[in-house]
Amino acid sequence: MEDDAHVPALPATGWAVLGLLSFERELSGYDLKKWADRSLGLFYWSPSFSQIYSELRRLEKAGYATSRLVAPDSGSRDKRIYRITPEGLAAVRAWAGTAPVDPPVLKHGPLLRLWLGHLLEPARVREVLTGHREHAETMRGRAEADAERAATDEAWAYPLLSLRWAERYYAAERDLADGLLADLDEREGDR
């Protein structure tokens, strides 16, 4: 694809779904959701089922994906599976290589509550930070487990690096929460 003018203005969800298909496997919408939850959801976001199916229809209409029905291994309904087309692969490659990369936007709910700590009981501030610490450790563990699964598939070499980043990120969030809890202990000791 030489000319970026041929790349449609897809929403980020469309590019994410096309990116999931770029591993050149036939996947159902359900499979795409599982893959998104195990990778994208750890560092970007995981689209809902309705978003995935909406984008799959858009991608098919644009000629970037095709689908077919397959008989299920069990059950009574046929399953629709999707595959990226050569045009879709060229489009997502062009988008990934040329689209501007937005800087991350930090919206940190627990830190906002800490910032408003003068309006809260100290126990509530501690509860928010402890909950955030627990969430960060859960997500770190999830990223670690997903990275272990991804390490068995050569096609996932770069997603594996993203998962390792997510593991480090959530470990840092956990450690930052620990530091803030220590800061609260010190502040309360000074009173």
Image (cartoon, rainbow, N blue to C red):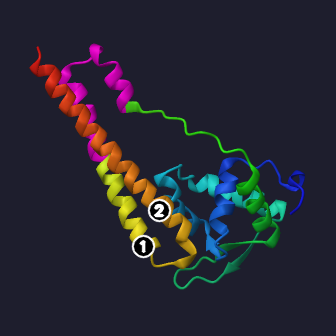
User: Mark 1 packing: few (<14 Cα in 10 Å), some, or many (20+)?
Assistant: few
Mark 2 or 1, closer to the camera: 1
Q: Is residue 124 magenta?
A: yes
CB within 8 Å, label 2 to label 1: yes
SS at badge 2: helix
Q: Is residue 125 above or below residue 104?
A: above
Residue 101 placement (x, y as % from top left): 66, 45
> Residue flagged by tag 2: what amino acid is it?
Arg
On the image, numbered disc 2 is attached to which residue?
38
Residue depicted at 40% across the width and 49% down the height: 169
> Residue flagged by tag 1: what amino acid is it?
Arg
The answer for how far apart the CA atoms under marks 2 and 1 are is 10 Å
Q: Nearer the viewer, residue 46 or 40?
A: 40
Q: Is residue 173 above or below residue 144?
A: above
The span picked out in magenta is 110-135
Residue 31 placement (x, y as % from top left): 55, 69
Q: Is residue 76 magenta?
A: no
Residue depicted at 36% across the width and 60% down the height: 142
On the image, numbered disc 1 is attached to which residue?
149
Residue depicted at 78% across the width and 58% down the height: 94
Left or right side of 162 for 148:
left
Left or right side of 78 for 154:
left
Residue 47 placement (x, y as % from top left): 57, 52
Q: Is residue 182 visible?
A: yes
User: Mark 2 packing: few (<14 Cα in 10 Å), some, or many (20+)?
Assistant: many
